[in-house]
Image (spheres, helix red, strand yellow):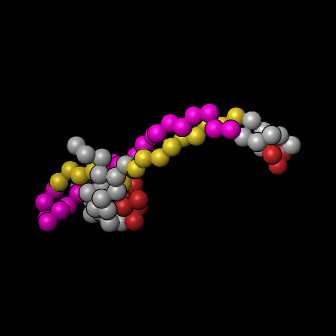
Amino acid sequence: MARICYICNKKPVTGRSVSRRGMAKSKGGVGQRITGKVIRRFSPNLQPVNALIDGKKKKITVCAKCIKAGKVTKAV
């Protein structure tokens, strides 16, 4: 099962976590230096939901933003 929202196609994005050491120049130091860059993933907040799609009950994964916005009609 892919980590993609069924409604808005939101998917994981990549970014970097940057580690620094040293005191900033504005605080009286000699400046910060980057000591490492780690690639990481930012995953969307996906939730499994029983929804009505074309009048039928179907289990889908939807992001929390779409659930809060009311874009999903939940099946009883």
Query: Where 22 sits versus 3, above or below?
Result: above
Q: In this view of the protein, which residue sits in the foreground, 76 or 59? A: 59
Residue at the (34%, 52%) spot, across then down: 11
Stretch of the chain drawn in magenta = 33-57
Q: Report the side of 75 relative to 25 (left or right).
A: left
Lateral position of residue 26 relative to residue 3, left or right: right
**Residue 37 is covered by the magenta coloring:** yes
Q: Residue 50: where, in percent of width, then height?
A: 23, 52
Percent x, y for residue 12?
A: 37, 49
Q: Give percent across and percent down for residue 8.
A: 31, 62
Residue 40: tell me if it is visible: yes
Q: Residue furthest right?
A: 28
Q: Residue at x 40, y 65 (%)?
A: 69
Q: In this view of the protein, can residue 48 be seen by the observer?
A: no
Residue 53: image quadrant is bottom left
User: For residue 7, what is the image quadrant?
Assistant: bottom left
Q: Is residue 74 above or below residue 42?
A: below
Judge left or right: residue 70 versus residue 26.
Answer: left
Q: Quick check: 33 left or right of 7? A: right
Residue at screen point 58% across, 40% down: 18
Between 41 and 65, the residue placed more toward the observer is 41
In this rendering, is residue 20 above or below 70? above
Which residue is pictured at 20% across the width and 50% down the height? 59
Task: State the quadrant of the C terminus.
Answer: bottom left
